[in-house]
Amino acid sequence: MKTRNAVAGRSGVLSSVGASAIFGVIFVLPPHLAPLEPEQILAYRIVLMVVFLAALFCVARMWDGVVALVGRIRSAPHLIGILVMDAALLGLQLWLFGWAPQTGHGLDLSLGYLILPLVMVLVSVTVHGERLSRLRIAAVACAAVGVAVAVGGAGGLRWPTLLVALGFPLYFICRRASGLDSAGAQLLELTAMLPFAAYAFAARPSFHVVADHPRLLFGLLLLGLLSAAGFALYLTASRVLPFSLFGVLSYVEPVLLVMVSLTFLRETWEPKDALTYVPICTGLALLAFEAVSKKSPAAPASRLDGDQPAARR
């Protein structure tokens, strides 16, 4: 049993880090998709993610889980409202992830992702009743110092920062609480966004723009493929890892986003920013040490099953 939990823990960590790396690459793409606007990019991204995930489900023979989930929703119609709310929360994050790098708000978004893991750790303790190891407490404390410096340096929190820091935890809480945290649920969430995509295509037609610029077609296909892969890995990590570890590992992504913002998006770096990222990187180093240590706590199977009791029905 311990071996099984250790394997699940390692796969969860690798999935989380892999997803963060993919999202770092995705962050570079929106500025190169001009003259498409953020809403148009989101519409293409939704459609392509549905297509790529559906293809993945065919190859991996995962449709039985989707059919079972649809049957569960039919027997509990209130889940439709939760699914639509999850879709709206996820859609908002997808739009923001494309809008920020196009409009010079990449660092505002990155700050939201810096605060996000602290909020998720707080959720893990207060909502899920998880206990933090000493190393994890130290990692959170280091990260909190860096976030406090970042918030002070920014002169407060801007709305893109708050949408990320508060919106994503609410999304994950709703998914876990309702048992809608499977890959099949993600496909249904994206399917629920298709009416928005249709409206965006009708309101601001852009097919002729894509047809006239082959690079846009390639960029959109790459965006859809990477998005599907990144979210699949991210949701895998959210299912198999304790909420606190999943939250703290999320610091890999904002560090990568900051690097992308500074190198590829050419946003400004100041020496004082080191006061933010040195403590955060120290926290990541503590997490890495815990992960390779023989004393690294693994999530018990009972906790994993208890977190998502209805997901396997």
Image (tube, rainbow, N blue to C red):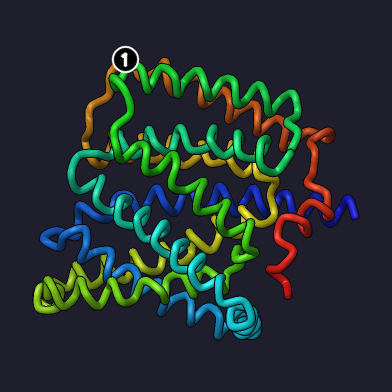
Query: Is 150 situated above or below 37?
Result: above
Query: Is 105 situated above or below 273?
Result: below
Res. 112 image quadrant:
top left
Amino acid bearing label 1: Pro
Q: Is residue 259 left or right of residue 304?
A: left
Any part of residue 257 in sight: yes
Q: Residue at x 19, y 68 (%)?
A: 216
Q: Which residue is mark 1?
A: 271
Q: Residue at x 40, y 68 (%)?
A: 225
Any part of residue 61 in sight: no
Q: Secondary structure at mark 1?
A: helix
Residue 236 place in picture, x, y as percent: 61, 59
Q: Residue at x 27, y 69 (%)?
A: 43
Res. 62 image quadrant:
bottom right
Residue extending farthest to the right is 1
Residue 70 place in picture, x, y as percent: 58, 82
138 or 163: nearer the viewer: 163
